[in-house]
Every structure is written in C-alpha cells, then in structure tokens.
Image: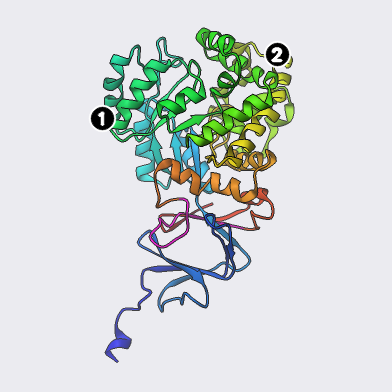
Amino acid sequence: MLVACGPAPGAGMEALTGATLIDVVTGRPLSDAVILVRDGHIVAVGAADAVPVPRGADVSDLRGRWIVPGFIDAHTHLQPWGLGVALRYGVTAVRDLHEGTTLADTLRAVAARASAPRLFLAVAMLDGPPTTYPDAWPVSSPDSADAAVGRLVDRGAAWVKVYTRITPDVLEAIVNAARVRQLPVAAHLGLTDAITAADLGVTSVEHLSGVPEAAGDSTMLFAAHAQGFFPGWTAFERSWSTLDTAALAVVARELAARRVFLVPTLVLHETLSRLDDSSIYHSADLRRVPDSARRDWNVAGMIKRAGWTRADFAAFRAARPSQDFVLRTFVASGGRVAAGTDASNQLLVPGASLHTEMELLVRAGLSSLTALRAATSWAADLLRADSLGRLRPGAAADLVVLGADPLADIRNTRQVVRVMLGGKWVGP
C-alpha cells in the first residue's frame, strides 16, 4: 500500500507514442516508436515493445505521424520577428552569422523571454576595410586579427564570420586567433579562394563562395570582389556556367578531403536567379513576414543598387546546374553539407526557406535522407552540438512531428504538426 501511494515513476515525464521515428543517423525508420522525455532531454527511445511507458507519464498519442529531430538553419541573419516564425516551421536552432552587436543583444533578450530557436551567434562579422556593412568590424592587417577575435569572445560570440574583403594573410591570422579560443570560423569568401581557405583551417564555406575562384582563373573574380559586394557577387554567379566540370569536380573533392563543411544556401542562389519572376513575390510563406520587414527588404532598390538586368538573372539561372554538380560531387566524395538559408534577407522567410533548401538539395541530386541530415545531424556537427540533431537518450528534446513521411518526399517536411523545444510543446 505504501508503494501504491508513492509518486508514479512517470511523474513529470512526457511519452510520445505511436509515431514513426526517422533515425537520421542510420537512415532507418522505426515504426510504433516510444520517446520518453524528462527535464528537457530524451531519456529513452525505442519500439513500443521494448520501451514501456511508465505509470503517470503524460502521453501524446501520435499514431499516423512521423518524428524527426528539430531542424537547424545553419546560416541566418534573423530579425526579432523571425525567431517565432522559424520555430513554427520546426526550426529549433539557428547559426546566425552577423547581426551587429546591438541586434545580437536584442535577439538574446527576445529568446530569453519567449520560445525561440537556440541561438549560435557570430555577433559581428569581420571584413576588410572599408567594410561592406557599417556594423561589420574591420580587420586591416594580420596584426589586428587577434584583438578583433578577442572582442568577439567578449561579446559572447559562438562563431567567427569572415566576409568577402578578407585576404588570405588576414584570414590565416583570424583562424589562428579563433583556434586559440576554440571558436570555429565561417567564411563568405571573396578575395580568398575556397581551397586556400580550407587549407588555412576555416570550418565552413558559405554560399559555395570561393569555389569558382579555385576552379578557374581567379584574376577577374578577385578584381570584381575588390570593387565591392555587388560587382563581386555578380561576377561570381556569372562565372559558374563558364567553368569546366572537371575543374569543379577537383575542387569539390579537394574540399571534401579537407573536411570543411559546405553551407551552400541554394535557396539564396535560386531566389536571386528568379527576381525577374513575378511568382516568387506571391509565395504563401510571405504572409508570415511583417509589412515593415517587406518594406525594409526593398527588393527593387536592391536590384537597382546591384545594377542587375534580365541578362544577369538568366546568367544566375545558368549557374545553378554547376552549383548542384559541385554539391553532388562533394557529398559523393565524403563531404558534409549543412542546410542554411540566409533568412531573413530579401524574400527568404525564416523557417520556410529551410524547407525549400532541403527540397533544392534533393533536386540537386542528394537523397531525402541526406537533405534531412543536412538540416539536423550534420548541421549539429557543424555547430559542435552533439546534443542536437539526433533523437537519442541524453539528447535535447528538440523534435518535429510531421504529418507525412519525409523520406518518401522531402516536401513532407513542410507538414509540421507539432514542435517540441527543450521538452515543451511550442507550436505551430
């Protein structure tokens, strides 16, 4: 009688039952799964006949559903409004690669008082003078790199982000300073090619930047990057369709051998290539974007500043098959990709764009499982966060309940039924 009156063994525990669990590590689905959650972490995972539900547990019957780890967007530039939007799409963690110090503090404050994805912040990116953005921090020489990285540490940065005007000698000094402080380095390259950056020790290459520069004659591209961001980006995108696939394959294999991550942001390339297509301005996902943010985007103004014409957009579209080829070759050679979006820059909706990114990865020739890994376990490896991106005992209870099988069709990741963050149901 005393035992019967004691606390139930499942008190304070959440039991998720009946769903098919997608193990993104092994690739095997587990039907009629049980996931036990307590104190924000997974305590047990297995088939129903192997993991009993303790008496007193709060049971969520999820029969007819699929469960995957919470999604990770590995390249964002979020505004406060985007945190909740991303979460509703199942994004439970973001690597935000430049906000400026004031916005970084604001994002932390918003996340502290309301449900929001876990934040891995770069705070302010490092760029060569004159910096492309006024809130970037200039690093003019190798001698000033250590102080700049030290300032980032003081501001709580989890990443170092370098930008297009950083030269190889300065990049080497930045990487060395970051390594001493055990900080990883993300690189949006311009004046440094991707092979050189990988040899210097960057952790990830963003947007496939530096790949054309490594695959062909970089003289023209470096000259364009030296002129400014838009001349450099335009020349970079235009160059893809002129490059020999054999040269691109060599770069892809070399990057895979150096174990650098690629964060290709295909959704960014695709979106910019279609700015002359009126349909992209009427996506249902855009309803999630506040009017003030749409005004700030000023897409027409951006096109004017860049000087882009229909011929440029056609050239950007012509670049896409070569970009997809590099990704296929890179992954086939053992390289790992992390899914990122560049949200919430122009027309890139937080959360929604990550689902599009997974679709584009599959369209590029990767499997649905690989695309899922890019947005879960591989992205978690990039973040050096082994408690994320996997559904296993001891992991954080960040997960997404889907209404259909994402392995059968990657577009089913959009069928978000419920989202759990740290063991609590938070949406949608």
Could you say which is closer to the camera, residue 179 or residue 98?
Answer: 179
Magenta includes 399? yes
Residue named by callout 1:
154
Three-letter code, disc 2: Thr
Residue named by callout 2:
309
Q: Considering only order in the chain, which callout, 2 or 1, is on the residue closer to the N terminus?
A: 1
Magenta includes 394? yes
Question: Magenta segment, which residues?
Answer: 389-402
- Tell me what residue is drawn at x 62 percent, y 15 percent: 234
User: Which numbered tag is attached to residue 290?
Assistant: none
Which quarter of the figure has residue 11?
Answer: bottom left
- Tell me what residue is drawn at x 63 percent, y 17 percent: 300
Q: In the displayed structure, would residue 311 be above or below residue 260? A: above
- 3D distance between C-alphas at marks 1 and 2: 43 Å
Three-letter code, disc 1: Asp
Q: Report helix, strand or loop for mark 2.
A: loop
Label 2 neighbourhood size at 10 Å, few (<14), some (14-19), many (20+)? Answer: few
For residue 43, side relative to residue 230 (left or right) = left
